[in-house]
Image: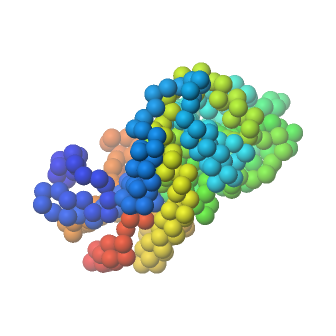
Amino acid sequence: MNTAFKAINQPLSNKIAVDGKSYLYFGGTAYLGIPKNTDFIKLYIEGINKLGLNNGTSRTNNIQLGIYDEAEKVAAARYGAAAALITSSGYLAAQLTVRALANLGQVSYAPAAHPSLWLNAQPSSSDSFTAWKAETVERINASTEQNWVLISNSMNNLVPEIYDFTFLNDIDASKKLVVIVDDSHGIGVNNGGLSAYSGLPERPNTEYVVVASMAKALGIDAGIVLGSQKIIGQLKKSPVFVGASPPAAAGLYAFTKAGEIYQAAWQKLQQNIDLLAGSLSSTWKYEPGFPAFLTYDQQIEQHFFKQQILISSFPYPNPTSAPINRIVLSSWHEKADIEKLISSINA
């Protein structure tokens, strides 16, 4: 592919212009189309005018912008948690959480856990989430260890596969669990546009902590942690949180005001998903309600490119691996965009 696609100088959107040609773009992680949403952008600019461009002071500084506490309260209520913590990135949110809580029990990593969740080197794990679930239940129930820390993504967005955590109910109720779930690709999209937190099973002796990047579906450069008042309070005392500058206040201002914008975008995304899914053969793999569609056809990326359509295509898990080819939909796609995509698939 032309190297010009590695140096695009325009906002990503449903269309990208390169070398005088316009391409339909079906990739990325802006699932709700927020970077192009004019109503959201107006809120962001309003936030800049009210609160400035950035804030390079610690959250423990004696002079504070009120938007940070306000945004955390809004986020907790919106996503069904008792409390929330917001940082400058999803990576930081995950790292401060894992490093603060990993000493609470025996640690077990699910497969394909995002690098932001790693304590050090890549942890070893089972080949599949299904296998890990069964092994984890058996291992914990047979162990004399009472305290466990389970660390997992909420889904594998590449395959894609949304993980089911009801297996936790099969673990001995006397075992104390801290379950850390990275919902970076699910927050704002899965569970009716909420987060993985609202879908986790009720279980005694269990602390759930959901971490996520807010830069994907939610469209702002920040990270979030959802949990109990106790856990969030503990995390806010950690040196990592105390020492880090917060995200731009303007983005959080827009986030607090954008509840209806997010909901409308989610509904549009679901319409787009339904339109494409209804025209695909069984050779495509996808999860209902999630906007990524995987194909094992290694030639399809070039097929689309010839028709000025760009999809997500890159080698995984290693640079020498075969490429993973996916169509990724967004709320910024129009019906005509998807109809052209469908015509190309069937051509």
Which of these two is toward me, 317 or 77? Answer: 77
Q: Is residue 202 left or right of residue 121?
A: right
Q: How is the image coloured?
A: rainbow
Residue 142 percent location from the top left of the image: 81, 37
Residue at (47%, 70%) from the top-left corner?
Answer: 268
On screen, residue 31 versus residue 71, left or right, reads left
Question: Front-most of 324 and 80?
Answer: 80
Q: Residue at x 40, y 50 (%)?
A: 45
Q: Is residue 29 visible?
A: no
Residue 338: image location, x then y, percent: 36, 73
Residue, far right: 174
Q: Is residue 178 among what the camera can see?
A: yes
Rendering coords of residue 150 (x, y %): 68, 38
Q: Residue 167: x percent and y percent?
A: 73, 51
Q: For residue 242, what is the image quadrant?
A: top right
Nearest to the observer: residue 179 or residue 235: 235
Residue positioned 20% across, 59% down in the render: 17
Q: Residue furthest left?
A: 20
From the viewer's perspective, is 319 left or right of 270? left
Which residue is found at the position 12% from the left and 60% from the top? 20
Is 154 on the left or on the right of 208, as rendered?
Answer: left
Q: Pick out the residue farthest to the front.
A: 50
Q: Which quarter of the rendering shows the C terminus?
A: bottom left
All told, the count of numbered labels is 0
Q: Quadrant of residue 151?
A: top right
